[in-house]
Image: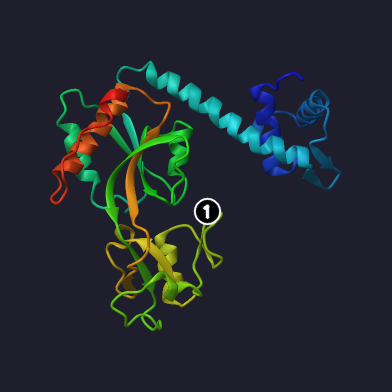
Amino acid sequence: MADLETREIEYFVTVADELHFGRAAARLAIAQPALSKAIRRIESRLGVRLLERTSRHVALTPAGEALLEHGRYALGAVRAAAESARRAGDTRAGLRLVIKPGGDADLLSGILAAYGRQPDARSVDVLFGGATDRADHLRDGRADVALLYAPFDDLTGLDHETLHVEGRVAVLPPGHRLAGRAEVRLADLEHEVQPHWTGVPDSGSGPEVADVGQLNQLVMIGRTIAVLPRSLVQPEHPGLVYKPVVDAPPSRIVLAWSARDRRPLVARFVAAALSAHDERPGHSPRSNPVTARA
């Protein structure tokens, strides 16, 4: 079976996203008949039907759903490879660090200060990602390093070092049955409605939320409660109640980067972040495991 070209995959993914040839053609800036012909050529080459189409309806077949899943991954890998090549060849390129807004547990300023003290330090652009897409920034080349929350963020394909370990708290409305407790346990929350976080398949079955701001509003009106890492609820909202969940597994803030990225530039930044970690009160210095990877 002949391989598909990158442009052909892009054509198919765009049609699959839009489920409309006219809109897909407009996005791709090509004529609709040319796009239809390209999709038929892909189907002929693969020997399967990818789309069921009538004059009013376009739908994916099982083969089309499979190609869409892997096609998106393939396009992302191509973009990441191109971006990595460009940045590897740019001796003046800085670093791009992606974080969750408000999700650095006050680590960021110390990390940037420690890195800035290095004589060969470069500029660091701080990017803000969503609730669940920061790891994808590393995989597709949009960022070089990221602050992520484990076990919530998917660390597959990433190297990482733990910078901070913290407990979790239950976020409750003031009139909640547990609001008067000094602390709660997971068993106390077993039958509570918890939110479904956008992009997280195994999160709760309650209302969908994309960020802590949305969550706070829903908790205040009694639609849901939540269990979050303590740093994500700072500063505390005055209209909510926060109780430590004493038997919840701890949350870790980690500095992550692509497992394939062996640039000394990245290794030096990670080493600086670890030195900043070691300098914080209450943390024991440790050897730097990143040096051998540089």
The residue singled out by tag 1 in the image is: 200
Q: Residues within 10 Å of mark 1 (few under 14, many from 20)?
A: some
Q: In which quadrant of the rendered view does residue 141 lie?
A: top left
Q: Position of residue 169 (x, y in %)?
A: 34, 66
* Picture quarter with the N terminus: top right
121 left or right of 85 in image: left
- Colour basis: rainbow
Image vertical order of residue 206 relative to residue 72, above or below: below
39 left or right of 265 in image: right
Image vertical order of residue 151 relative to residue 178, above or below: above
Res 15 seen here:
no
Q: Residue at x 31, y 17 (%)?
A: 91
Along the viewing direction, whichever of 173 and 285 lies nearer the viewer:
285
21 left or right of 6 in image: right
Q: Residue at x 40, y 83 (%)?
A: 177
154 left or right of 180 in image: right
Image vertical order of residue 12 relative to residue 208, above or below: above
The number of callouts visible is: 1
